[in-house]
Image: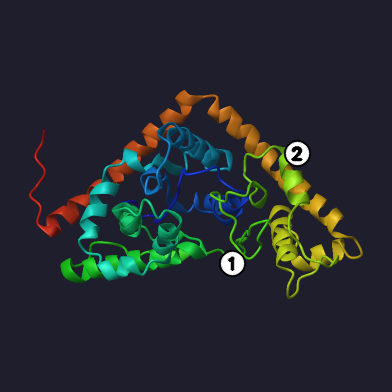
């Protein structure tokens, strides 16, 4: 592995068009690691199929997610950008770690309970063991740091537990990863239900602003955003909707909450919502332009996929050789 640099790993599912929550809470923070860390940013298509997917749509969204990584500023010359299913070590290590993960640990995962409730007709084994595959994704690259949202902290803790358990049995094998949650990372909530996180799978389109939404759609969604019965742009109890819009405006403009309150002092919600929409659309326009340019060049996207997969697969060899030896597998023959 790259001993001169610490390792960062993160992944995004291609299971829907990414939202401004994905951008502000995750992807926009990824590029800050590019110069000082060895960064692996993965399109986790294997995780996506725990819920039934339309195959053609999944393939298209895999290309789109890779293109969005780059459109949002991730340079493939500085980061390893790749597709999870293109690197066989993820599945292989996932199975091995399944054998070192307790049934009760997986049963306590809140996302399994949530997704089982939403997909009662398809509570499959992959949905149950998803956190172990996530642990394999991380541990495969001897990851030091995982940029993670609050909803994934439980999975990261399980990855740490699995790493320590394996190390305890076989000696030093895996780096025990740390989570990284930027203090200024925006937590973006639904525009329709501001006590719930914005989700790309939300059936209410007015609740979600997507990175690829046209400008007029973005402005319309913010205009319809839920606020409260008052009229002041201020933080406070019962003002979840206003605070969410303030957080979004702050993230896109760099202004503090105090500055936002002063800017809109004496002005109503109409002015404020319009300003938030404009700030969001202005920031997303160059990203959309670059995305469209990249999507028009499928050969280039496939070149990035291939080079990223080759690099990632090479970097997994040492970890997988060590793991295979320690669990007692025989040496792989040369074909």
Q: Quadrant of residue 5?
A: bottom left
Q: Secondary structure at mark 2?
A: helix
Q: Which mark is residue 216?
A: 2
Q: In front: 97, or 69?
A: 97
Name the side, left or right, on which 29 lies relative to 108. Answer: right
Q: Residues within 10 Å of mark 2 (few under 14, many from 20)?
A: few
Q: Is residue 138 visible?
A: no
Residue at point 39%, 64% (across, down)? 156
Q: Residue at x 73, y 39 (%)?
A: 215
Q: Residue at the spot x=31%, y=51% of the render?
A: 1
Locate residue 271, reporting x and y percent.
86, 54
Image quadrant assignment for residue 162: bottom left
Query: Which residue has dot 1 on it?
Result: 183
Relative to 74, 156 lies left or right: left
The image position of residue 296, as x and y in percent, is: 55, 24
Q: Which mark is residue 313?
A: none
Nearer to me, 317 or 268: 268
Q: Residue at x 41, y 64 (%)?
A: 113
Left or right: where 19 falls relative to 138:
right
Mark toward the viewer: 1 or 2: 2
* Near-viewer residue (232 or 301): 232
Rendered-image quadrant of the C terminus = top left
For residue 2, above or below residue 195: above
Note whether residue 54 is visible.
yes
Question: Looking at this rendering, what residue extends furthest in the front direction?
Answer: 121
**What element does badge 1 sit on?**
loop
Q: Position of residue 55 (x, y in %)?
A: 40, 34
């Amino acid at each position: 592995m790259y001993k001169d640099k610490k390792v960062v790993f993160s992944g995004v599912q291609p299971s829907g068009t990414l939202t401004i929550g994905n951008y502000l809470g995750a992807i926009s923070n990824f590029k800050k690691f590019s110069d000082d860390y060895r960064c692996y940013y993965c399109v986790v298509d294997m995780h996506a199929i725990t819920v039934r997917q339309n195959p053609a749509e999944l393939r298209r969204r895999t290309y789109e997610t890779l293109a969005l990584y780059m459109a949002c500023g991730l340079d493939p010359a500085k980061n390893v950008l790749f597709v999870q299913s293109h690197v066989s070590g993820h599945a292989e290590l996932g199975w091995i770690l399944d054998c070192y993960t307790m049934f009760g640990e997986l049963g306590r995962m809140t996302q399994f309970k949530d997704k089982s409730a939403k997909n009662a007709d398809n509570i499959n084994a992959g949905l149950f063991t998803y956190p172990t595959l996530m642990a394999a994704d991380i541990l495969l690259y001897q990851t030091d740091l995982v940029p993670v949202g609050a909803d994934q902290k439980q999975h990261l803790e399980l990855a740490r537990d699995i790493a320590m358990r394996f190390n305890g049995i076989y000696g030093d094998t895996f780096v025990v990863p740390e989570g990284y949650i930027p203090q200024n990372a925006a937590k973006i909530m639904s525009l329709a239900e501001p006590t719930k996180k914005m989700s790309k799978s939300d059936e209410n389109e007015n609740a979600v602003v997507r990175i690829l939404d046209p400008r007029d759609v973005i402005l319309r969604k913010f205009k319809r955003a839920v606020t409260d019965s008052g009229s002041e742009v201020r933080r406070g109890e019962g003002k979840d909707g206003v605070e969410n819009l303030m957080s979004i405006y702050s993230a896109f403009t760099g202004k503090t909450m105090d500055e936002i309150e002063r800017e809109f002092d004496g002005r109503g919600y109409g002015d404020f919502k319009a300003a938030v929409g404009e700030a969001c659309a202005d920031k997303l326009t160059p990203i959309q332009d670059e995305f469209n340019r990249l999507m028009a060049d499928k050969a280039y996207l496939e070149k990035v996929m291939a080079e990223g997969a080759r690099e990632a697969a090479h970097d997994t060899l040492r970890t997988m050789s060590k793991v295979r030896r320690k669990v007692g597998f025989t040496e792989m023959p040369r074909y």
